[in-house]
Each structure stands twice: as structure tokens, then as C-alpha cells.
Amino acid sequence: MSRAVADNVAIAPSVTPEDLAELMRAFNSAAGELGQTHEALRAEVSRLKSELNEANVRLERGRRLAALGEMAAGIAHEVRNPLAAIALHAEMLRADLGAGVEGETAGKILRAARELDGVVGDVLRFARELAPALAIVNAAEPARRAVATCQMLAESAGVDLAIEAAPAFEDVEVDAGLVAQALANLIRNAVEAIGEAGGAGPGSVGVSVEVSGDRVSYEVRDDGPGLPEGVVERMFNPFYTTRHTGCGLGLSMVQRIVDAHGGRVDAASMDAGGARFVLTLPARAAAMVTEGVA
């Protein structure tokens, strides 16, 4: 061995088993922290991908609805003018004919024309661009408005309608009028479903409100027949309906209002019977900006 090598060997510090053990502990600790960081990053990437997919779905749905609404609005305008003429002449004819079979027939024509005009009005409202007028309100305010709007309908159908739970002082930033409209559409659907089912005893519809962090959830729950299999995937499509009346725009309007707020709507049948709809919206406009909606 040369002198230089021997000198290096002589001055090299000795490594004890304790040093090696400490080194291994440090290495294992660093590896564990890296593993935790890696898992956290994977979870965050997965969450961001999910949010991006939801945003893309909302965007694509919005584009389709905008195109459909534009087409429907054009057709509705073309239909409304001759429909108004039919209604006017039917009313004049009924006045001329007076009582009797002919007068009753003219009255039926007039009622049918007015019903069609109502459908045209629904189509035009659906086609109108939605721009929520956000304002700070009590979170329960939209639910109270919706219940007040539908109370008479529920009573006439023998259905108990009530707000089951609502925060007393929580404030949120939403368009209270639009959210109330969405909830009223859901309540009407629930009341009609209970009426068509014709079960024993009075039915019930409950509305609840919950604020959690930067989200507010509105739930409409009924004890009706629930949602038929295969309906959930299609029920929010414009003009799709399983009812004997209506043109199938109520739930589509709910979807548009929720999308305009940057939220989501979930629907499902409950194990105990009945259906459950949940509207989950950002509680503040800042959350909408974060999600790229505003």
C-alpha cells in the first residue's frame, strides 16, 4: 500500500453501527414523508381532474342547451303569432254563438289555444339566457319562497309540505329568485308524483337546507313512488317527461339554474321509498370564480 493511500485510510473517520442506524432512520423518515407527499399529490391531481371533468360536462351541456334554446325560441316565436290569432277568433266565435254546443266547442278551442300558449311561454323562458343576480341572503330564504309558492298546490293534492331543517342565521350569496324557482319545480314534481301514485294516506314533501364550508345544499325529499329505473340519466334533458301533463322543461330549468350558479344536482330513489333531489351550490361568489364559473 502506498503512503498516500495509507494516510487516507488512517485519517478516514470510523462509522459506528449507531451512525448507520441513525442514517437508516433518517432515510426511512424521508422516504415516508415523500410517500405521503406523493399520495397527497395523487389525491389532489385526481380531485382536480374530477372537477375539470365536471366543468367540461357543464360547459358542453350549456352549449347544447344554448343551441337547443335558440332553436326552440325561434320555433316558439313562429308558433305564438298564429296561436294568438286562433285564440282571438275562438273567443269572438264563442261570444257570437253564446250558450249551446257550438259555444262550448268554441270555448274548448280557446282553452286549448291558451294551454298551447302556456307551453310556448315555458319554451321562451327556458331559452332565455340565465345570468344569476347574486346577493347575500339567508340560506333558508329560497326554500321559504318555494314552499310558499307551492303550499296551495300541495294542500289541494292532500300533500304535507314543510321545511324540515334550515339554518337560522347562515348567509349565502345566490340568486334567491332562481334558486326558489328551481326548488318550486322540484316540489311540484314531487306533489304530482305522489298524486299520480295514489297511495293510501296523505303524502309528504320535505325541504331542508344545509350550509357546510363554502357550499350550500338544498334537498327536496318525498315519499312518493320514487324514480323509475333508467329515468335519472335522462330526466334533466329538455322536453323529456314521464308525466301526463307538461312539456318536460321543469327539471331542465332546474339543471340550467344549478349550472348558472356553478353547482350540481343529484337525484336518486331512496331505499325507504320516494325520491331525493339535492342542489349543491357555492355559498359565495368567490367559490364560483375559483371553479371558473363566474
Image: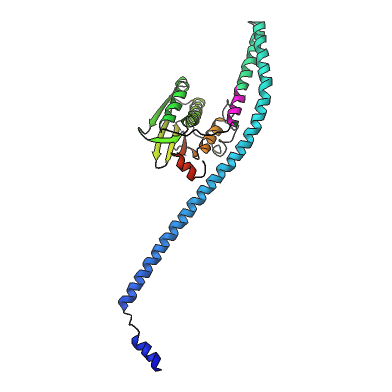
Residue 67 vs residue 96, the one in the foreground: 67
Q: How many marks are shown on the rendered structure?
A: 0
**Residue sitting at x 63%, y 10%:** 104
- Relative image position of residue 64 (x, y in whole percent): 62, 39
Please name whichever residue, 233 or 177, is drawn nearer the observer in this view of the structure.
Answer: 177
At 45% from the left edge and 42% from the top edge, which residue is drawn? 286
Does 84 sit above or below residue 162?
above
Does 130 sit above or below residue 55?
above
Q: Quadrant of residue 173?
A: top left
Report x, y in % for residue 200. Answer: 45, 25
Q: Quadrant of residue 241?
A: top right
Q: Is residue 1 visible?
A: no
Classify residue 3 by image quadrant: bottom left
Q: Is residue 127 visible?
A: yes
The structure residue drawn at horizontal position 54% and vertical position 35%, both measured from the top left corner, is: 256
Where residue 15 appears, as percent x and y from the top left, is 33, 80
Which residues are drawn in magenta? 118-126
Colour scheme employed for the rendering of this structure: rainbow
Q: Residue at x 64, y 31 (%)?
A: 72
Q: Is residue 185 above or below residue 213?
A: above
Whether the magenta-drawn stretch holds residue 261 is answered as no
Q: Would you say residue 120 sits in the magenta stretch?
A: yes
Q: Position of residue 209 (x, y in %)?
A: 41, 34
Where the N terminus falls, by quadrant? bottom left
Observer-nearest of 108 and 89: 89
In-image side of 120 versus 280 (left or right)? right
Q: Main secondary structure of the magenta part?
A: helix
